[in-house]
């Protein structure tokens, strides 16, 4: 039997069997039965299962000559038993190997452990996880040896590598020596994103993780040619401390992330994976429980089904994590819930695929997974992993939410897409906190060649090398000059053009609050409010208004306020907040306020209006429907059609009938000939006019597919 990497990737009902169980109590795993587990998987309709070879605890579930087998398994090879039991049922299998998190290795070889720069100690007294350093060559050899055992002794369809990142700002001997050799410097102990010393060290950490990831993936392909190999990219979203670069996702057979955030985190990531993943489908992983920390509370069937349908509508595979009971048994309810969720996607899964239809792209930069508010803090470990709300990340998610609600076809792109920016009519740079020279050059060239950008906040002010520039690196594109920062608690945008007045009506202005704790003393932190700018060559669409007495807040004795509860607008300035410039063949809209990050309706309405204006008539796909209906489209030339997906996200059963009116343009060189309702959709009206088509559909299910055929 040979490994067929695609058999796991193309399987649509996947499960990861979580088994991070220690062995210091002889009852642990005492009732583990691979045959019973395989039968449960078959009953739940699974067609792919990921099996633990080595867990975070560091114990193997097979007889290892390098690591230590779980002490309660006796002489059994339960990994091999489960692998055989699943494969004889026609269920594809992948091996799971924990990297970095390995209690056995960290305790047996303390010299392998990551050392917290802020304390000079390992993390053993603050976390359950033994954390090993990827720069230690002996530790690397250990993991590569484990991998060789896993891949050469057993047949697999895939290998999934977890936790390839830093947890500590590591100052172990291996890191210290490597940094001295590469940079001739000591590891800094203070975070400062405007200090080249800190920025250089952070870039080294990202480079080291990228190098180690490539070594692991390349070795896996050498050991088992044809196997699907991927690694968990989720901790890139945890931010700079983990130092996991998004671009490492290009090394994988397909991109995979486990996520525990809200629907908009999932939305941004699945759309990003459509472009980042080397092959499709990419993979979205969630837990069957409400959180990995809570072992007993399951998501409801509708909740898990909605997540499965959202992944499917984004063209992504869906995999569910289920944690084993410490004694080794399964919770039957978990399998019932998974079965129902996978059954919900069955009518749709054979139809997915194709090239996403997108007019707009949100630029998602992992160099900006940080916060200037952290400048000056001690370089210590994170309090918890997960999608940390960094300013750029929150702005990107806000943009995604606004565009989705407005039914504007969009994608999410990263640094790996800089050479194909011309594929999008407009690109959003949502408070991109730090930028590289390559990024700046790419966006300047994109606009000069006819592209349109919307940029906000501090975009392009700070270089990734730690240089805080006197002006935006894209100042020539924006047509504005940086002259300072807001240092009060709130400021306002006053319309200077009808497009702004119409967008925010009935409001007359929009606000940008920087601090809502109005009863607490406040001092503005550099690079955390809004830039103050002056238009140089751009047309001003909105100007800056400040409250009375700004930046002073005032008190009973200090009369620097005009209303006791609020700070109404008072001082009308000539500084620009919102501007537009035509550069070359393209356009650039710059907003000092991060409109897309705001939760208020007027701010988001203004953001959407500006994006619609940048797109103009170049709309490949658009619609009118309730804001909770998510719209996406895919060109499927192998089927001579465009697939339109309409997800009535989270609709309660019985799903109310919704109507959606959709307009789309045919792919270049094609002519539409018909519109057909797919699963969940009934076409009530349509107009096919060759290069364009429109239709009205009734959505009778939470997810509806419509096929627009062309010739």
Image (tube, grey):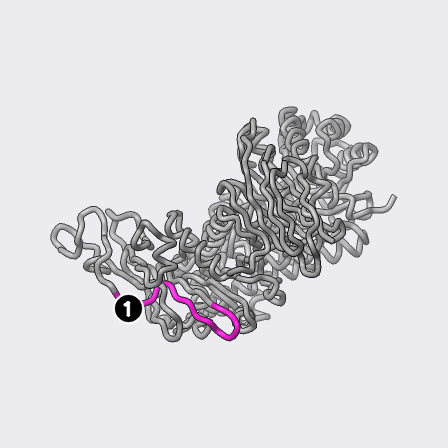
Choose between 662 and 543: the one closer to the eye: 662
Q: Estimate the x, y position of residue 482 in percent, counting from the top left.
A: 37, 70
579 in the magenta segment: yes
Nearest the viewer among 155 and 184 is: 155
Q: Judge whether residue 75 is colored magenta.
A: no
Outermost residue, right side: 1
312 vs 434: above or below: above
Q: Residues within 10 Å of mark 1 (few under 14, many from 20)?
A: few
Using the image, determine if residue 616 lies above or below residue 347: below
Residue 259 image offset from top left, x and y in percent: 57, 43
Give the number of callouts: 1
- Magenta span of residues: 573-587
Along the line of sight, the residue nearer the viewer: 260 or 342: 342
Q: In the displayed image of the protein, which residue is found farthest to the left? A: 557
Residue holding disc 1: 574
Left-right relation of 520 to 368? left
Q: Position of residue 186 (x, y in %)?
A: 50, 67
Classify residue 200 as left or right of residue 256: left
Quarter of the rendering occupied by the N terminus: top right
Residue 313 visible in the picture:
yes
Q: Tag 1's secondary structure?
A: strand
Query: Residue at the location (40% across, 60% down)?
Result: 375
- Viewer-nearest residue: 205 or 446: 446
Q: Is residue 66 above or below residue 338?
A: below
Residue 107 visible here: no
| Residue 225 location (% of width, % of height) | 81, 53
């Amino acid at each position: 039997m040979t490994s067929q990497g695609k058999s796991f990737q193309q399987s649509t009902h996947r499960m990861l069997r979580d088994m991070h169980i220690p062995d210091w109590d002889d009852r642990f795993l005492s009732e583990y039965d691979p045959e019973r587990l395989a039968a449960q998987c078959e009953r739940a309709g699974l067609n792919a299962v990921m099996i633990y070879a080595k867990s975070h605890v560091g114990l193997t579930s097979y007889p290892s000559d390098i690591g230590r087998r779980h002490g309660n398994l006796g002489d059994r090879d339960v990994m091999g038993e489960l692998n055989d039991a699943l494969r004889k049922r026609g269920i594809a299998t992948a091996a799971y190997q924990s990297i970095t998190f390995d209690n056995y290795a960290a305790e047996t070889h303390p010299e392998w452990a990551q050392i917290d720069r802020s304390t000079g100690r390992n993390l053993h007294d603050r976390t359950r996880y033994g954390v090993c350093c990827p720069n230690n060559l002996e530790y690397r050899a250990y993991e590569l040896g484990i991998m060789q055992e896993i891949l050469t002794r057993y047949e697999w369809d895939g290998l999934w590598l977890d936790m390839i990142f830093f947890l500590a700002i590591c100052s172990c001997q291996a890191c210290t020596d490597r940094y001295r050799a590469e940079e001739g410097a000591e590891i800094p102990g203070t975070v400062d994103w405007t200090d080249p010393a800190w920025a250089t060290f952070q870039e080294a950490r990202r480079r080291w993780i990228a190098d180690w990831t490539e070594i692991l993936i390349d070795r896996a392909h050498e050991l088992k040619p044809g196997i699907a190999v991927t690694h968990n990219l989720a901790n890139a979203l945890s931010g700079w401390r983990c130092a996991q670069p998004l671009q490492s996702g290009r090394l994988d057979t397909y991109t995979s992330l486990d996520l525990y955030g809200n629907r908009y985190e999932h939305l941004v990531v699945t759309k990003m994976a459509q472009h980042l993943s080397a092959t499709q489908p990419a993979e979205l992983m969630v837990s069957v429980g409400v959180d990995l920390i809570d072992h007993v509370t399951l998501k409801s069937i509708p909740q898990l089904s909605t997540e499965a349908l959202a992944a499917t509508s984004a063209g992504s595979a869906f995999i569910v994590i289920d944690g084993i009971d410490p004694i080794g048994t399964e919770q039957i309810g978990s399998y019932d819930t998974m079965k129902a969720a996978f059954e919900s996607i069955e009518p749709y899964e054979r139809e997915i695929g194709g090239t996403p239809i997108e007019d707009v792209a949100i630029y998602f930069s992992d160099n900006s997974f940080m916060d200037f508010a952290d400048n000056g803090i001690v370089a210590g470990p994170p309090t918890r992993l997960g999608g940390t709300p960094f300013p750029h990340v929150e702005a990107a998610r806000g943009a995604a939410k606004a565009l989705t609600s407005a039914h504007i076809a969009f994608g999410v792109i990263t640094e790996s897409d800089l050479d194909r920016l011309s594929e999008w009519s407009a690109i959003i740079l949502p408070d991109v906190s730090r930028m590289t020279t390559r990024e700046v050059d790419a966006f300047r060239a994109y606009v000069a060649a006819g592209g349109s950008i919307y940029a906000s906040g501090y975009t392009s002010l700070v270089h990734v090398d730690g240089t805080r520039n006197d002006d935006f690196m894209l100042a020539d594109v924006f047509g504005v000059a940086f002259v300072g920062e807001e240092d009060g608690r709130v400021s306002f945008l006053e319309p200077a053009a009808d497009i702004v007045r119409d967008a925010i009506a009935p409001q007359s202005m929009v606000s940008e609050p920087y601090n809502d704790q109005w009863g607490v003393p406040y001092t503005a932190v550099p690079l955390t409010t809004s830039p103050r700018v002056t238009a140089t060559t751009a047309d001003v669409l909105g100007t800056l208004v400040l409250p009375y007495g700004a930046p002073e807040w005032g008190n009973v004795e200090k009369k620097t306020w005009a209303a006791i509860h609020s700070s109404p607008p008072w001082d009308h300035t000539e500084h620009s907040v919102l501007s537009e410039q035509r550069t070359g063949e393209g356009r650039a809209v710059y907003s000092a306020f991060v409109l897309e990050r705001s939760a208020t309706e007027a701010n988001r309405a203004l953001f959407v209006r500006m994006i619609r204006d940048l797109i103009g008539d170049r709309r490949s796909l658009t619609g009118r429907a309730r804001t909770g209906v998510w719209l996406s489209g895919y060109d499927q030339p192998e089927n001579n059609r465009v697939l339109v997906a309409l997800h009535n996200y989270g609709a309660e059963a019985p799903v109310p009938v919704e109507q959606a009116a959709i307009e789309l343009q045919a792919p270049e060189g094609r002519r539409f000939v018909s519109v057909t309702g797919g699963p969940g959709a009934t076409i009530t009206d349509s107009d096919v006019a060759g290069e364009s088509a429109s239709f009205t559909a009734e959505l009778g299910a939470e997810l509806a597919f419509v096929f627009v055929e062309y010739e």
